[in-house]
Amino acid sequence: MALEEKINADIKSAMLAKDAAKLESLRAVKSAILLLKTSPEGYTNETELKAMQKMVKQRKETAEVYKTQNRTDLADVELTQAAVIESRSEEH
């Protein structure tokens, strides 16, 4: 099963479970995949993996900024999203 199909199935599961944090993360991954499909560099497994790694890195960096500003509530959200995205990239 392709990653996009897995993400769509996971989105449905997250909606049924009413897991907002997971749903938001999965929608971000789906959005990145759709952007890759229209990008000039094309949609390959390599570009897909790079995009997901970039998303994880961005969320971890944002969480660090929030921690320095004593906003652990926002940092926790970013770290949760990073974990969800990272788990999907490992499956790939």
Image (cartoon, rainbow, N blue to C red):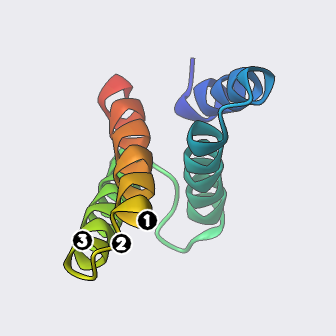
Question: Where is 68 relative to 77, above or below?
Answer: below
Q: Quadrant of the N terminus?
A: top right
Residue sitting at 55 percent across and 48 percent down? Answer: 25
State the separation of the CA atoms marked 3 and 2.
Answer: 6 Å
Residue sitting at 66 percent across and 49 percent down? Answer: 27
State the separation of the CA atoms marked 1 and 3.
Answer: 8 Å
Secondary structure category for the residue under label 3: helix
State the separation of the CA atoms marked 1 and 2.
Answer: 6 Å
Amino acid at circle 3? Lys
Question: Where is 17 relative to 82, above or below?
Answer: above
> Observer-nearest residue: 13 or 89?
13
Q: Which residue is mark 1?
A: 74
Q: Is residue 19 left or right of residue 72?
A: right
Question: Where in the figure is residue 26, as x and y percent of width and height?
Answer: 59, 43
Task: Evaluate if marks 3 and 2 touch, with contact meaning CB atoms under 8 Å apart.
Answer: yes
What number is the disc on residue 71? 2
Question: Where in the figure is residue 22, as x and y percent of width and height?
Answer: 57, 38
Residue sitting at 60 percent across and 24 percent down? Answer: 6
Q: Is residue 67 left or right of residue 23?
A: left
Q: Is residue 45 left or right of residue 14?
A: left
Amino acid at circle 2? Arg
Task: Evaluate if marks 1 and 2 touch, with contact meaning CB atoms under 8 Å apart.
Answer: yes
What number is the disc on residue 67? 3
